Amino acid sequence: MRRLNHVNFILLLVLTLGLGACGDDVYYTDDFLRNSDEKLCSARAWSESYITDENMKCVHQLKFTIDKSGQEVFNYYRTGESRPARVETFNFSWEWIDQTMEGLRLDRGAGEILYFDNVWVRENYLSGSLDGVQVTFVKEK
């Protein structure tokens, strides 16, 4: 009988400790998945690379600041060169399109507005549809 009590106690202890480990996991909370100004502005720059029609490598960067300003930079490189042959820079102000924080409006001024739809900001990447083109930027550290 005494042995049965020890077994019951051990089973109860294992069950109690096991269920205690089933709490909310911070990784899956709604705040973790939600876009925010802090996540968007946490990168020094968001960067993607592609080859242009002129066979040049383009490094496209987006930089966002917490004061709602930003910069879009295009660095164009010829094959085998480490310095850009051409650089285009555009300053912009930005805002979330609505409270869902799933779209951005980038205003370059002079009536030139870009829309960044279906925005996903994650720890190391930023993706969505920038003016109708699917893009994925990687966080520069």
Image (cartoon, rainbow, N blue to C red):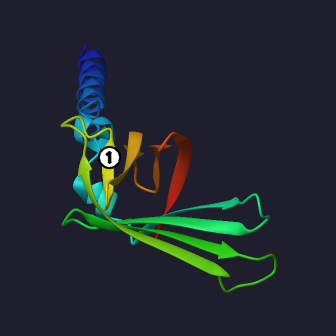
Helix, strand or loop under label 1: strand
The number of numbered discs placed on residues in the rendered structure image is: 1
In depth, the one of 16 and 55 nearer the eye is: 55
Task: Report which quarter residue 110 is drawn in.
Answer: bottom left
User: From the viewer's perspective, is residue 48 above or below residue 118?
Assistant: below
Give the residue at the far top of this rendering: 1
In depth, the one of 93 and 122 nearer the eye is: 93
Please tell me which residue is depicted at 77% across the width and 64% down the height of the picture: 54
Residue annotated with mark 1: 104
Please tell me which residue is depicted at 28% across the width and 34% down the height of the picture: 21
Looking at the picture, which amino acid does disc 1 mark? Leu
Tell me if 25 is positioned left or right of 46 in this view: left
Of the 4 image quadrants, the one containing the C terminus is: bottom left
Tell me if 95 is positioned left or right of 50 in this view: left
Check disc 1: other Cα within 10 Å, few if <14, some if 14-19, many if 20+: some
Tell me if 86 is positioned left or right of 73 in this view: right
Where does residue 16 sit, x and y in percent of width and height? 23, 27
Of the 4 image quadrants, the one containing the N terminus is: top left
User: From the viewer's perspective, is residue 110 above or below residue 79?
Assistant: above
In depth, the one of 32 and 40 nearer the eye is: 40
Where does residue 65 sit, x and y in percent of width and height? 27, 67
Task: Report which quarter residue 52 is drawn in.
Answer: bottom right
Q: Residue 141, can we see it?
A: no
In depth, the one of 136 and 22 nearer the eye is: 136
Please tell me which residue is depicted at 32% across the width and 39% down the height of the picture: 33
Q: Residue 60, can we see it?
A: yes
